[in-house]
Image: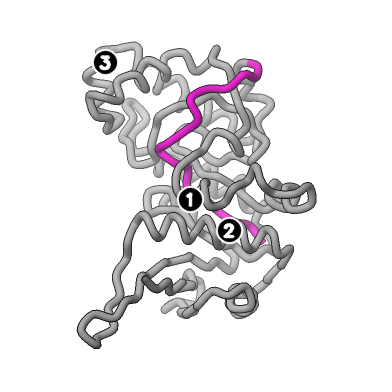
Amino acid sequence: MLILLPPSEGKAPGGDGPSLDLDALGLPRLGPVRKRVLRALIALCKGPQETARQVLGLSPGQADAVIRNRTLRNAPTLSAAELYTGVLYDNLALGALDGEASERAAASILIFSGLWGALRLEDRVPPYRLAMAVNLLPLGGLAAVWRPALSRHLRAQADGRLIVDMRSAPYAAAWRPDGPTVAVRVVRERIAGGVVERSVVSHMAKATRGVIARDLIVSGAEPRSPSQLAKVLSDLGHVVEMEEPTRADGTWTAGIVVSD
């Protein structure tokens, strides 16, 4: 099983590790694209601050992120497991996993990134700000920039494994796995006036995806098909509605139903 996660906008404020070593990151064949994107991001952020802020989609109160991006090559690093914060990662609670579960997480989780392409949990990088939806000149849209390299170099990572995809749309656009893939969708169910209503709530969806990822890691389960995944999640206490794809090579959808 391979669990694909988005990054989080929120990140730990800084690390105490050595400065960035691109050659030491996992998935080293992504290195050439990482260097190109890093170079373009630093160049953008060394230019007019207002231009960089607008390109990166930052508010005036987030201008400090532009300043941090200028020094990425020399900034202290921390592991990806420590870097990403926010609702999904709070509920995943990587730091609270025991030794065996932590090893399973390291082997099973890939975090997608507009700057790094994809990271393993032990990869050390500095705090940064660059979303996959950004159009980063002169490179262009980052999903398209990353797609060829990710398609070539992640195939071996996914070979023979069920993909559990919890990425948001911009990150999912950067790589579509070839093998069996299940996208996790979360819906809130409540009864209003005697009528069952369903809706998608972003905050709840992120929290539930974090719980699902943690439960799968802690359980030690290794589902190899969508039906096995549905059974594992049901056994773990989740309400699951598995939907088949419309095409033979399409993505399955695991609808996780949560109630108020």
Asked whether disc 2 touches disc 3, contact meaning CB atoms under 8 Å apart, the reply is no
Q: Amino acid at mark 2?
A: Ala
Q: Quadrant of the N terminus?
A: bottom right
When asked about the image quadrant of residue 223, the answer is bottom right
The stretch in magenta equals 1-18
Does the segment drawn in magenta span residue 3?
yes
Which residue is painted at 78% across and 47% down in the image? Answer: 99
Q: Is residue 240 above or below residue 72?
A: below
Identify residue for label 1.
88
Which residue is painted at 52% across and 29% down in the image? Answer: 34
Which residue is painted at 28% across and 21% down in the image? Answer: 52
Instruction: Determine whether the residue tagged by mark 1 lies in a helix, strand or loop.
Output: helix
Task: State the separation of the CA atoms marked 2 and 3.
Answer: 38 Å
Q: Amino acid at mark 3?
A: Gln
Does the segment drawn in magenta span residue 259?
no
Q: In this view of the protein, which residue sits in the foreground, 73 or 176?
A: 73
Instruction: Determine whether the residue tagged by mark 2 lies in a helix, strand or loop.
Output: helix
Task: Give the image location of residue 118, x and y in percent.
Answer: 55, 41
Return the mark for residue 213.
Answer: 2
Identify residue for label 3.
49
